[in-house]
Image (cartoon, helix red, strand yellow):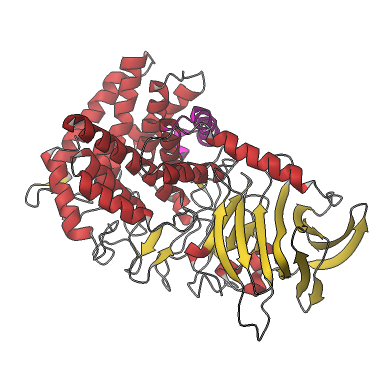
Amino acid sequence: MASPIEEYGFISDLHTGALVSREGSIDWLCLPRFDSESIFAALVGDESNGRWLLAPSRNVGHSFEPVVVRRSYRPSTFILETLWKTEEGEVLVTEFMPVGGHGSLLIRRVHGLQGQVVMRQELELRFGYGKILPWVCRIHDDDGEALLAVAGPQAVLLRAAHLPRAAGYSHVGEFPVAAGQTVDLQLHAFPSHNVPPPAIDVDQALQTTSAYWTNWSRNFIPQGSYDREVERSLLVLRALTHARTGGIVAAPTTSLPEEFGGERNWDYRYCWLRDAALTLEAMMTHGFRQEALYWRNWLLRAIAGDPHDLQIMYGIAGERELPERVLNHLAGYRGSAPVRVGNGAVNQYQGDVVGEVMVALAKLRDQGVHEDHFSWPLQRNMLLYVENNASRKDHGIWEMRGEKRDFTHSRVMMWAALDRGVRAVEQHGLDGPVERWAELRDHLRSEILERGFNKEINSFTQTYGRTDVDASLLVLPQVGFLAYDDDRILGTVSRLERDLLDGNGLLLRYRTETCLDGLAPGEHPFLACSFWLVEQYSRTGRVSEAKSLMDKLIGLGNDLGLLSEEYDAIEHRMAGNYPQAFSHLALIRAADALNGAVRHLKRTMA
């Protein structure tokens, strides 16, 4: 059975990523990209769907079972270290995916610290999301003996001093590691028509990978409290970015349930314009302008073409076809079916998306980045898309699978898109039909204030004509539609606190039992929404409440500083896809706002 979500570590080579459980089992890995088919899928099935266990052997009759003493990343990296202690001794397991020039490769290094520990490995390779059993054989080449697995176009090669032996449809084996001894295991993936790749120098790869991550992190400037969490969140955002294309995936996993046993299981291994744009903002705020430019280039390639064909998400290289299908051979994470690949929301109309993108690109402009012959014309095309869809109902930020509605948040983000277009002309000297944009912008503002705000309950509402509220309304002041301390925003916050705060002080996105989202009711608090509330509290002088909520949210991360999409506060477990970019970028915004509020408070008291 798969481990609790919070028990997994994450390692990445900026092309794909693996999830490693505290028990030493790699239960999820797609190769060669985040959105490729998996070779290990035990996370959403069972061991027979693929996994690679490496841990101290558990001997029957021993009074002391192997335990993990500590687990951590090397500072400012995605090199995972796990210290195991057994009755016979201690070993340190170091796991990472080399960055730069090695292809798809996963390294597991076991170093003996005390005594002698017998390590056990169990290798089940299953291609095609756990469905395809490869042909496995031993080969000999200049680097010695290796285990080769082939199925169609894919091949995987295990190089190790102690290769596991066939046992049914698995390969198992044990090997001793004495104090001072180091044993390396290298898992290479490559096209089956190619010659198997040679062994690499693990010491050199470890040094190069460590240097990459630490050098990248040097751009991070400490801000005050929560620096460790902010730095790790920035690293997560970088780890979810494809090195060659610049595409940023929302998460490296699919179908981790938002409601255990429910149907809210989605594939997040794609690039949402919204998530990527917000990631861009977080990167820029903390000095990573080059990454922001790289993403802008990805965006321009992805959306190039007819503005009528704009999508809310794309593949990692800008692919447009992401059809959703169910993998019936997989039982789902701890029985939570269905397991989906692809995402049907790709065909939805979500009116807010252009707004997020235009807000992010405006911030890039304000930092002195000049538009070129390609970037501004495409932004004009996006604004034409807004104009052409100005009266169209949509599915909203949460990708409702019910009927389309006039979502207040979506209408505000359309206003924000036009507002940034007007500013680009007026403040940066760019060309465009500014009068037309300004007229539509002002019309939208009037409409939103008239139809999106309910005077009887003194709150903005999720959609026009209803009284339900939605946590996305906290974004209104973030994009400058109204001030954080505007009475209408404060009234909305009061309504959100009344209607959407759960018994544990976490904020729901909306009430699934009353909102017609096209799915059965039930989900856990979406962590980004509570981080938005921290930001709102910080901007309006509620600093102690902001800090209390922030500390609670930080405590919901695991020992590695990773966050999932949602949190089940009743059972004290993570829920949803993991690690989740949206949660981490919202953490960064909340920390920035809270640190700013604390500094302001200190100045006023001085």
Q: What's the residue at 68%, 81% (across, down)?
A: 59
Say which quadrant the C terminus sits in: top left
Q: Considering the whole magenta stretch, tell me its main secondary structure.
A: helix
Q: What's the residue at 12%, 47% (across, down)?
A: 491
Percent coordinates x, y for residue 62 in the rendering: 65, 83
Per the rendered image, the range of residues in magenta is: 286-309
In which image quadrant can residue 174 be found? bottom right
Q: Residue furthest bottom?
A: 61
Q: Residue furthest front?
A: 115
Percent coordinates x, y for residue 566 in the rendering: 39, 59
Q: Quick check: can you spot residue 218?
A: yes
Percent coordinates x, y for residue 310 in the rendering: 45, 39
Image height of 296 relative to 371, above or below: below
Q: Quick check: can you spot residue 406?
A: no
In magenta stretch: residue 306: yes
Q: What's the residue at 41%, 71% (across, down)?
A: 262
Q: What's the residue at 76%, 48% (across, down)?
A: 202
Image height of 74 relative to 123, above or below: above
Left or right: where does residue 526 sit relative to residue 102? Answer: left
Left or right: where does residue 497 sit relative to residue 1? Answer: left
Q: Which of these two is toward me, 98 or 103? A: 98
